[in-house]
Amino acid sequence: MISRKMTEMTKNSSAIRAMFEEGKKMAAQYGEKNVYDFSLGNPNVPAPAQVKEAIEAIIREEDPLMVHGYMSNSGYEDVREAVAASLNSRFATNFTGENILMTVGAAGGLNVIFKTLLNPGEEVLVFAPYFGEYRAYVSNYDGVLKEVPADTETFQPNLKAFETLLGPNTKAVIVNSPNNPTGVVYSEQTILALAEILNRKQEEFGSSIYLVSDEPYRELAYDGVEVPYLTKYYKNTIVGYSYSKSLSLPGERIGYLVIPDEADDSAAIINAANVANRILGYVNAPSLFQRVIARCLDAKADVAYYDRNRRTLYEGLKQCGFSCIRPQGAFYLFVKSPLEDEKAFCELAKKYHLLLVPGSSFACPGYVRLAYCISYETIVRSLPEFARLAKECGQI
Ligand code: PLP
């Protein structure tokens, strides 16, 4: 008999994954070219050439006993120093290797930080719409996830509602910008206002409220938009970064946490996060890929490829009469469902071999998410199907 908790988790298992599995079945039935799978955020741009070159150079040049061996649970010192130096040069921060903990992707980093911070029953606030896996990451440590309802005008955090939901039991707040599922980048103005509220509430409650900035899409920003570096705006910020999307390495499971010295109880958090990384069973982030990213800190994702997809899909959907916010980052489009029940709309879309994810998976019903990290050709071929779908829904 499996545990009660896992029984629940299994029941609510990801709608995104379910759609992805369905896509594979449909591709077998109708042919891959005739299925338009917008379900999964799996980068379709290959990792930059530097990644392959780095792997080859490491195998050639570095001591295999070192490359494949155990190291400190936080990661290799030289890699952490290199990551800190790169952040300092990009964002004028003051980190050292001590502030960096190498993690098993963003998911591993978030689990480490929530294990480190949460007592059972403590609350974590999150702005809808949000990446549904946060529910599990918080529940893993018996925290309580509280959703701040979406501001569907702008999809910036709804700060009015946020302020009313903060309480003495709030331990952390998650932000994710560029955002999955909307593609919205939180503006500097939003971040300044968020920091002001958090500082005021910390004082009022005499507590520390940690802002956990989940940033796997930091490098995927378009139109020259700036993505503010949050440790500079609020001292109790902890950053979770990942190379899954920026270097197209989701299967390699590599990322890091930044725990700044300025954060309350920083030394204790760094120490506990190091232990959490070990006792969660990760032990340490994958060793080869720690060494790879230290050599690839200046490598760039092919943002132009995603940008062309973004513009083509956005313009194409607008022409069909769909309404959606113009995304400035990540590789997602969040579209208003023309049917009140967006799950029914996703079902209808399947008739045209279009696989979309219902907004309720992101705590924002009435919308659907499209991941456009697929081939440009697929996007172009999908547009007539969207036009047919729109017609059936009375859009055009
Ligand atoms: N956070 C967000 C917002 C994501 O979209 C994802 C993956 O899609 C993750 C975290 C997990 O990323 P990783 O593969 O680095 O664990």
Image (cartoon, grey):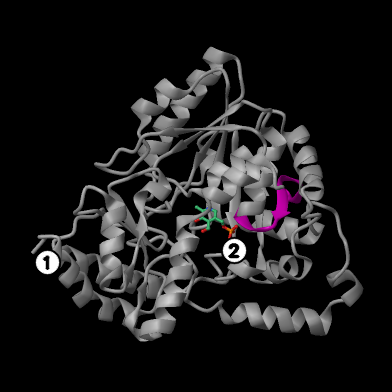
Label 2 Cα neighbours within 10 Å, binned few <14 / some 14-19 / many ≥20: many
Quadrant of picture, ligand 1: bottom right
- Give percent across and percent down for residue 307: 35, 69
The residue under label 1 is 391
Q: Please tell me whether mark 1 sits on a helix, a strand or a loop.
A: helix
In the figure, is residue 211 to the left or right of 282?
Answer: left
Instruction: Evaluate if marks 1 and 2 touch, with contact meaning CB atoms under 8 Å apart.
Output: no
Between 290 and 134, the one lying in front of the other is 134
Q: Secondary structure at mark 2?
A: loop
Disc on the earlier residue, 1 or 2 = 2
Which of the 4 quarters of the picture holds residue 99?
top right
Q: Is residue 48 above or below residue 120?
A: below
Residue 34 sits above or below residue 197 on the image:
below
Q: Any atom of ligand 1 within 8 Å of the CB at mark 2? A: yes
State the residue at coordinates (61%, 38%): 139
Query: Range of the magenta residues?
Result: 96-106
The quarter holding residue 296 reads: bottom right
Q: Residues within 10 Å of mark 1 (few under 14, many from 20)?
A: few
Disc 1 marks a residue whose amino acid type is Lys
Which mark is on residue 243? 2
Please indicate whether residue 349 sits to the left or right of residue 355 in the image: left
Does residue 381 show up? Answer: yes
Location of residue 4 by image quarter: top right
Q: CA distance from mark 1 to mark 2?
A: 40 Å
Q: Where is residue 372 shown, x and y percent of the image?
A: 37, 68
Q: Residue at image x 51%, y 48%?
A: 12
| Residue 362 lies within the magenta run | no
